[in-house]
Amino acid sequence: MKRLSALLLALVMLFTMVACASDEEAPATEAATEAPATEATAQEEEVLSDEPVVIHTIHYMVEGNKSAGLEAIQNAFTEKYPNVTFENSAYSQGTDYFAQLSTAIASGDMPEIMMGNPGLYTDLIDGGYVMDLTGNEVIESLGLTQADMGDVSYNGKWYAFPVDFKTWGVYYNKTIFAELGLEVPTTHAELLEVCQALEDGGYDAWAQWYSDGASVDIEMRPIVWTKAIQNGDNDMFEKLMNNEAKVADYPYFAEGLQLWGERIGDWARADATSNDQSAANEVFLSGQAGMLYQGTWNYGSLEGLKSEDFDYGFFLVPTDDAEGEVMNVQVDQAFMVNPQAENAEWAVKFMEFFLSECMGMWSDYTMQPCITGATTENTTDFLKSILDVKASGNSVGYGEFTVPFTSAYTAAYRKALTAYAVYCCTGVTTDGVNSVETCIEYMQELFDEEYAQANL
Amino acid sequence: MVKKMNPPRLSRQSTRIHRGNLLFLLPTVVLFTIVVLIPFIQGIPYSFTNWKSIVSVDREFNGLNNYKYLLTNKYFLESLGVTFKYTILYMLSANIMGLILALMIHRSSWFNNIARTVLFLPFTVSVTAGAIVWSYVYTDVYTYLTGLVSPLGMPGQIVYGMVIIGAWRDMGYTMLIYIAGLQAVPQDYYEAATVDGASKWQQFWRITIPNIVPAFTTNITLLLAWGLRTFDLPMAVARNAREGQFTAVYVYDSIFSNNKAGLGQAAAIILTVILLILTQGVTRFLRRLEVEA
C-alpha cells in the first residue's frame, strides 16, 4: 500500500507537466478571415445591435501605465456603446504569454483581441485565428509607412492594428555629464572617451541588464538592422532561417559585436550579467551609472520612478555611419483580432475607435510614441524628438525585412549574444564564446540546431 | 516438499476498513485520472509526430525520430545533465540543512516552536517570489560585500546560485519531516544506550539515524521528484542562460516558444520515464533500510 501511495504521489507530481502538452485536436480552422471594414452594411448594423457584448483581450502589457491606458480607452468605448464591456488577461511576454494564448485557442476559448506582431504568430494566422485586415479603411487612413505596415503584415496581408512604435538608444544622466563636463558623443570614439571619463569621475559608465535577452538584442540592432537594410539584405532573416545563408555571410553581425564589445570595454559593473531591466533602472536612477542603453518602452517606467530632480537625456548610439545615425523603428503595441471569437466584429470596431480617436490618450497614459505621430499638450519633448526623427524618414524599420526572426531563432540569437556579453563583462568563456568569431560560430550552431529541429 | 500455504484471509472488519481507505482515495484517484493520467496517455501518440504548433491540426507520424533526435542531441542531454546536477545538490543540501536544524530544535520549547515557524516560512513563499528576492540578495548584498559577480550572472555558478535558493526554500519542509521522525524515536533506546555507556555520537549513528530512515525516504523521494521537474526557478532567474536550460524548461520551450510540440512531448515523456525509474529505485532502496521502531 505504501509503495502504491508513493507511486501515485510520484505520478501526480510528474505527469502534470507532461499532460500540459496533450490536448484534444485544435478546433477546425475553416473560418473566414476577411476584413469586416469592407463588408456589407448588414454586418455593420449587426455590430451596432444593443445586445450585451463582452470583448476579451489577451495581452502582455504588464506595466501598469500601459494596462491603465488600455482600460481608459475601453471605458471611453463603453461610454459610447454601453452594451459593450471588456475582460482583460495580462501575461508576461517573456514567459507565459504565448503559452496562455495558444492553450486558450487550442481549447476553444477564443479571445477577441490578441496583442502581438503577426510575424511572430504565423501559426495562428495559418490556423485562421487572425483576421485579415488588408484594406481596412481606418488603418489606410493613418498613412503609415511600408516599414510600419511590414511589422503587422504576413505574406503581404495586414493582420494587426499598429498602435505605437519603439526604438532604442542611450539614456544619460545630464547632471553627471554636466558635473564632469561631458558632451553627448557623436562618434564611437567619443562614446568610449565618455565611458572612461565617467569611470575616472567615480561613476560607472553603464547600467547594464544582460540577464534579459532583449538587452543584448537591442545592442546589436543599430548595426545589424541598419546595415542589412542599407545594403539591400532585406531577406537576411528569411535566408538565415531557411539555411540559405550563414551568419558569417553578413558582416554586420561581426561589426555589431565588435562595437558592442568595445562599448562594454573594461567598464562593466559586477552586476551587469545578473541585472534585469528594473535592476538596471535602479542603478541608473540612483546615479551610480552615467548611461543606460535601453528602449523607448522603458521611458514611462523611468518617468514614473525618477526623483523630481533627476535630469536625463537620450541619444542614439553612435556607430560612425557615414550617413549619420539612423533610428531603428519597430511597431511595439499591435493588436490582432480573432475572427473565430464571438464578438470579433465589435473587436474590430473597438480597435478602429482606438486608432482613430484615442491615440493621444494612449500616448499620454503610456508615454509611448504613437505610430500615427499623434501628440497632445502633455506630450513630452522626449517623445516629440523621437516622433520628429521618425517623421524625417531618417529611420530603418524592422518591417522592411521580408520576415522577422521566429521566437525560436530569436531565443537562439539571444543565447549566443548573452554568451558574448558574459565574456566581455566577466572574461569567462561560456559555450566556447570568447571572441567575435566564436560568438558567430556559436550563433550559427544554434541556428543549425533550430533548422534541424524544424525539419524532423 | 514445501507445503502450499493459503494466503491469510482478511477478517470482515479488516475488509471493511480497507474498503473505507479505498473510498478515501477515490476522489483523488478519479481527479488524477481525469486531469492527469488520461491526458498524459492521450499525449503519448503526439510524441511520434512532427506536430509543430499546438493550435495547428497538421501533423504527420514520424516514428521514433523525435526520440532518436533527443537522445543524441547535445542540448537535450545537457539539459538533463544540468537538471541532475541541480537535483543532486539541491536534494543533498536541503536534506542536510533540514536534518541539522531538526536536530537543533526538535525538542519542544517556546523558542524552538517559534524557530520552526520562522524556518518553515520560506516554504510558503512561491518559488518565483523567493527567486526574485534572492536575485536582489546576490546583486545588492553579495556583490556589494565581495565585489564579485552574482552567481546568477556567472557561468559555472548559476546552478549553485539556484541550489542555494531551492535549499533555502525547502529546508524548512524537510526539517519538519525530520522533527516528526526524531520525536517518534522511543526515548527508551537512548536511556538504555546511555546506561550501556554509548556516547552521543554513537547514539546518533546507531539509534537516531536508523530510526529516522522513513523520514529520509519521504524527504529524498519528494525532493528528488521536485528537483527533476524544476521549472519555475530557472525561468525566474536564468531564463537566458544555458545553465538555466533545465529539462522541464526545454519541454516548455519546445512546445510553446519554439512550436515543436511533438518534440517537446517526446522530451516530456523521456523526463517522466527517468523520474519514475529514479523515484521508484530510490524509494525501494530506502525502504530496505527502514527498521521497525
Image (spheres, coloured by chain):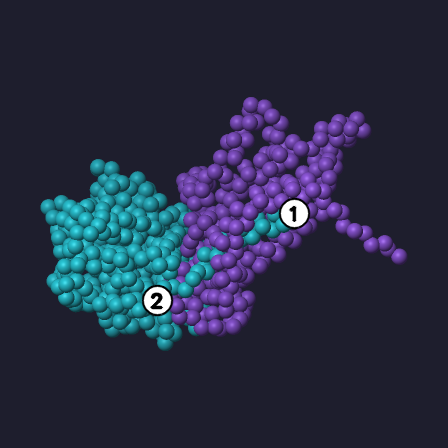
Chain colours: A cyan, B purple
Amino acid type at mark 1: Met
Q: Residue A390 lies in what quarter of the image?
A: bottom left
Residue, x 15% and y 46% (percent of image)?
A79
Please say if B101 is above or below A267: above
Instruction: Residue at the far left: name it.
Output: A377
Label annotation for residue A419: none
Across and down, in percent, residue A185 comes to 23, 54
Please say if A436 is above or below A292: below
Across and down, in percent, residue A258 comes to 35, 62
Q: Tell which subunit mark 1 falls on.
A: A
Side (left or right) of B281 relative to A22:
right
Mark 2 burial class by Cα count in 10 Å: few <14, some 14-19, many 20+: few
Pointer 1 or 2: first along the chain:
1
Side (left or right) of B195 relative to A88:
right
Residue, x 27% and y 40% (percent of image)?
A305
Label annotation for residue A28: 2
Quadrant in which the N terminus of chain B is drawn: bottom right
Please say if A179 is above or below A232: above
Across and down, in percent, residue A276 comes to 36, 48
Label annotation for residue A1: 1
Residue, x 43% and y 62% (percent of image)?
A24
Q: Tell which subunit mark 2 falls on.
A: A
Q: How many marks?
A: 2
Side (left or right) of A243 relative to A373:
right
Quadrant in which the C terminus of chain B is drawn: top right
Quick one: SS at disc 1?
A: loop
Amino acid type at mark 2: Ala
- Residue B273 visible to an observer of this rendering: yes
Quick one: SS at disc 2?
A: loop
